[in-house]
Image: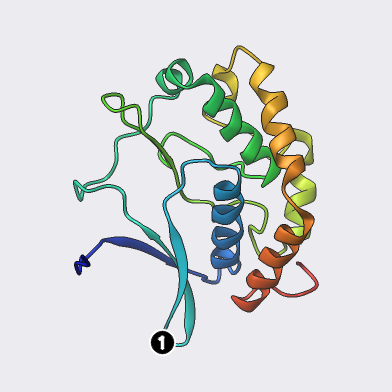
Amino acid sequence: ESSFMAMAAVAKRANDGMPYAVASELVCANLARVLRLPVPPSLIVEHDGAPYHVSLDFNLAGQALPPADGGALVAAHPHLAAGIVCFDAWIINPDRHNGNLAFDKSTGRVSLFDHSHAFLHGQDPKAWLMQQEPTLGIGGHCLASKLNDGRPTKEWVNRIKQVPEYFVRDLLRDAVEVGLPPDVA
């Protein structure tokens, strides 16, 4: 039996300061999904001739989420926390702070969101990528300093290595369709 439902979502579009935000969100959300990291379902929609990255709003309270407690998240989910750090290093996301990571202590549920500052950030993403090299692109990551067991990292690195090249190439092709210049892809 089918039912019609209304659902809340968060939509992002590119702007002058973040011209590749939609492409970055698209690529990162799909890479996270293929690794089985907890990101909300998302899609691309067009509105007034512009592409938007739209993700389901998992925050049913309708209020700003409280900052995630990184120490509690690592204690409850050390394997997942290592995966989040490895993922953010892979996508060169120096913007993982406790405001774009949700952790509900009562249910144990974790959600990642906001990847617009990842590898395609800024007006000149190639130059920006070079600037991130000394910190592995994760600079002040809110979970990295709290990890105390490196063993799960090996499994996450292996998962990343197993992502098929065709999958990444197809995602970049899709990113070009939503505004990423082909020479940047």
- The quarter holding residue 141 reads top right
| Residue 164 visible in the displayed image | yes
User: Is there any visible trace of residue 143 in the rendered image?
Assistant: no
Q: At which x and y percent is residue 101?
A: 43, 38
Q: Position of residue 77 (x, y in %)?
A: 47, 22
69 up-or-down from 8: above or below: above
Amino acid carrying mark 1 in the image = Asp
Q: Quadrant of residue 153?
A: top right
The quarter of the image holding the N terminus is bottom left
Q: How packed is label 1: few (under 14 Cα within 10 Å), some, or many (20 or more)? A: few
On the image, which quarter does residue 95 sit in?
Answer: top right
Say which residue label 1 marks.
48
Q: Residue furthest front?
A: 1
Query: Looking at the image, which residue is at 59% across and 69% down?
Result: 19
> Please, which colouring scheme is shown?
rainbow
The correct choice, above or below, for 68 with respect to 163 in the image is above
Most extreme residue toward the top is 148
| Residue 147 x, y percent position in the rendering | 58, 17
Q: What percent of the width, then of the height, locates residue 164?
A: 75, 52
Q: How many marks?
A: 1
Decide: is 146 above or below 184.
above
Q: Under tag 1, what secondary structure? A: loop
User: Is 107 left, or right, of 98 in this rendering?
Assistant: left
* Residue at left offset 64%, top offset 21%: 152
